Image (tube, rainbow, N blue to C red):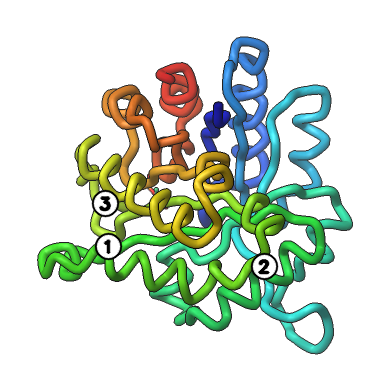
């Protein structure tokens, strides 16, 4: 049985005081959560929030890491730095990074490798744009994203990766993939994992759905057999909504 994971991606939002209040409110109910919960705040809040969340099972993840080990890369944050403050997870390849910061498959492949070699678990995002879906090339596109940045990994390393399927047309738009659309793509991703690594490994890998998940659509999405939870953007900024999503599974 795969565990279910609910991760909140706060993106570039909130002051530190707001972030502390949000984390404290999510922590308040942690005793009743039956699934793994993770928060991905902006870099400067990671240390403060680790203290805030001490004693709870809520994990922290970063939203990005550099594609280099260390050195003269002003403004970057390395995987080693995240590991040195005990951050277990890092989001890699979010569509906003691919789109606004032009992160290529090669860069993402390097980031995945560096995250893993520093002991972090990557949450690798993939997903198609509206144009690609309308042209009926969604599977082909996601397949290539997996092939280009993940499928070089060893059997051991791939099992330390969480995959997040996030159709770009559903992120922050209020448009959600139907439960069937999500299940179809998750099933496809698992089949590709199975083709590359074999069924026992594919069955162990967590595949999250992301894209306008809200309290009223979460239960149906998360009840699909290959949907192992969600990566939540907008709704993770409201404690009540995020908690309702966690409890909807
Ligand atoms: C995201 O950015 O990962 C995301 C899924 O955002 P939203 O839930 O706001 O669509």
| Quadrant containing the N terminus in the rendered view | top right
- Mark 3 is surrounded, within 10 Å at the Cα level, by few (under 14), some (14 to 19) or many (20 or more) other residues, namely some
Q: Residue at x 41, y 61 (%)?
A: 126
Looking at marks 3 and 2 on the same chain, the residue that comes earlier in the sequence is marked by: 2
Q: What element carries label 3?
A: helix
Judged left or right of residue 33, residue 60 is right
- Quarter of the image where one finds residue 181: top left
Q: Find residue 170 and name its label.
A: 3
- Mark 1 is surrounded, within 10 Å at the Cα level, by few (under 14), some (14 to 19) or many (20 or more) other residues, namely some
How far is disc 1 from disc 2 in space, using C-alphas? 27 Å
- Quarter of the image where one finds residue 197: bottom right
Whether residues under marks 1 and 3 lie with C-beta atoms below 8 angstroms apart, the answer is no
| Viewer-proximal residue among 152 and 25 | 152
Q: Find residue 53 and name its label.
A: none
Looking at marks 1 and 3 on the same chain, the residue that comes earlier in the sequence is marked by: 1
Task: State whether label 3 is within 8 Å of ligand 1.
Answer: yes
Residue 114 visible at all = yes
Q: Where is residue 130 in the image (x, y as percent from the top left)?
A: 18, 63
When the figure is inspected, residue 172 is found, relative to residue 106, above or below; the finding is: above
Q: Residue at x 67, y 12 (%)?
A: 31
Q: Residue at x 67, y 64 (%)?
A: 154
Q: What element carries label 1?
A: helix
Q: What element carries label 2?
A: loop
- Residue lying farthest left? 134
Residue 13 visible at all = no
Judged left or right of residue 16, residue 195 is left
- Residue lying farthest right? 84
How far is disc 3 from disc 2 in space, using C-alphas? 24 Å
Judged left or right of residue 240, residue 64 is right
Q: Residue at x 79, y 39 (%)?
A: 50
Say which residue label 1 marks: 139
Say which residue label 2 marks: 65
């Amino acid at each position: 049985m795969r565990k279910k994971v609910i991760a909140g991606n706060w993106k570039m939002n909130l002051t530190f005081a707001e972030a502390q209040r949000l984390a404290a409110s999510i922590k308040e109910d942690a005793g009743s959560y039956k699934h793994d919960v993770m928060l991905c705040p902006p870099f400067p809040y990671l240390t403060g929030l680790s203290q805030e969340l001490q004693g709870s099972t809520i994990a922290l993840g970063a939203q990005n890491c550099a594609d280099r080990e260390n050195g003269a890369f002003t403004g970057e944050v390395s995987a080693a730095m995240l590991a040195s403050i005990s951050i277990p997870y890092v989001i890699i390849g979010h569509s906003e990074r691919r789109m606004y910061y032009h992160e290529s498959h090669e860069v993402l492949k390097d980031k995945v490798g560096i995250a893993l070699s520093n002991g972090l678990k990557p949450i690798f995002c993939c997903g198609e744009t509206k144009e690609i879906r309308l042209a009926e090339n969604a599977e082909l596109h996601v397949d290539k994203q997996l092939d280009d940045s993940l499928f070089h990994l060893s059997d051991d390393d791939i099992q330390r990766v969480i995959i997040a399927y996030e159709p770009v047309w559903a992120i922050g738009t209020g448009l959600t993939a139907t439960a069937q659309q999500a299940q179809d793509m998750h099933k496809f991703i698992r089949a590709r994992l199975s083709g590359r690594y074999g069924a026992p490994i594919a069955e162990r890998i967590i595949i999250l759905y992301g894209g306008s998940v809200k309290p009223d659509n979460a239960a149906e999405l998360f009840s699909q057999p290959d949907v192992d939870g969600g990566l939540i953007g907008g709704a993770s900024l409201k404690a009540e909504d995020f908690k309702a999503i966690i409890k909807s599974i």
